[in-house]
Image (cartoon, grey):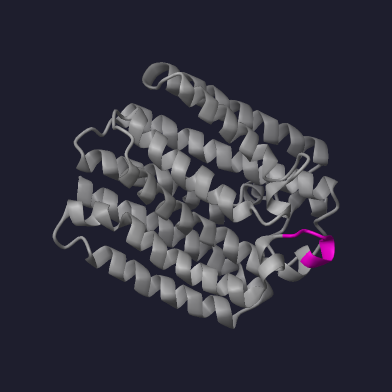
Amino acid sequence: MSLLKVWIEAMRLRTLPVSLAGVIFAGALGALAWHFSLVPWVMCLVFALLAQIASNFANEYYDFKAGLDKAGREGPRRGVTEGDITPAAMKTATFLTLGLACAVGIVLVALYGEWWMYLVGVATALGVMAYSTGPYPLSHHGLGEVAVVAFFGIIPVCLTYMLMGGAFSWWLLAMSVGVGLMGANVLVVNNYRDIEDDRAAGKRTLAVRLGLRAMSSLYLANGFMAVILTMPAWLAASRWGWVAPCVYLVLHFMLYLRLVSRRGRALNPLLGMTAVLMLLYALALALMGI
């Protein structure tokens, strides 16, 4: 396997639509409210993408250091665990990517934001690391899904919207939670697939704590709750706005049926499908806002 392919795999391309979807959804909200602004939106997109890649790198590095990954795991190949990438190289890549994200964030807030947004940026940077390391790694204690709702839903949707000139509101917060629930479903699939490996490694993920049946039910419920919370945007966009959410729910239910009927590596494609469905949902709203 080529070195480039190994690094691309370490970025976990299947999951990257999650970071893009929140910013795209916020851009759609901005377009519907007549205050879409291209430059801050693009900068938010770059920041979100870099932050997620840094989080994926950190997860691989710190799980390896903690002995939580093993060769031949059910999930996608881990370059450090398999010996394709040195731990030192992965650590360097983690902090370099996170540093680039922080640089983009600093410029973004300086140009378009308010001082308190720097605090949110610091919290996001800490969250990138706290997901996998620190005194209480979130992903090891059943809080990974909560972190996804916050860092891939609430923060990107609300801040992108506000950096484009919009005002905070409770309906904005509710819709950002809905987007976050869609993102959390990607992690639900990941932890559902890895439940045996995580249990053996001592990782107390939400799947390990609740079991497969509860996690599959959570996956289904998250999708329906996400549509309910984001429905105001669709209805504001068009009288036919209910069509796209209904299509989403049909596809979501089909993915749920796959989830409960498969195990192990057979779930890997479902992880990407869940992320892509979330991205398509955001893109559909964006098209309606144009």
Q: Position of residue 27 (x, y in %)?
A: 32, 40
Is residue 45 among the parts visible in the rendering?
yes
Give the camera-side residue of 253 and 235. Answer: 235
Q: Quadrant of the C terminus?
A: top left
Q: Give the farthest residue toward the left.
A: 239
Is residue 3 among the parts visible in the rendering?
no
- Who's the residue at 42% across and 58% down the image? 278
| Quadrant in the rendering for residue 157 | top left
Q: Position of residue 1 (x, y in %)?
A: 72, 54
Looking at the image, how many numbered discs can be counted on the residues?
A: 0
Horizontal side, residue 120 vs residue 174: left or right:
right
Looking at the image, is 121 positioned above or below residue 4? above
Q: Give the farthest residue toward the bottom.
A: 261
Q: Position of residue 117 (x, y in %)?
A: 47, 25
- Who's the residue at 41% across and 34% down the image? 159
Looking at the image, is 275 positioned above or below residue 167? below
Is 137 magenta? The answer is no
Q: Give the farthest residue toward the front.
A: 170
- Who's the residue at 62% across and 26% down the image? 99
Horizontal side, residue 246 vs residue 14: left or right:
left
Is 201 magenta? The answer is yes
- Who's the residue at 84% across and 48% down the image? 66
Q: Which residues are magenta?
A: 199-204
| Quadrant in the rendering for residue 203 | bottom right
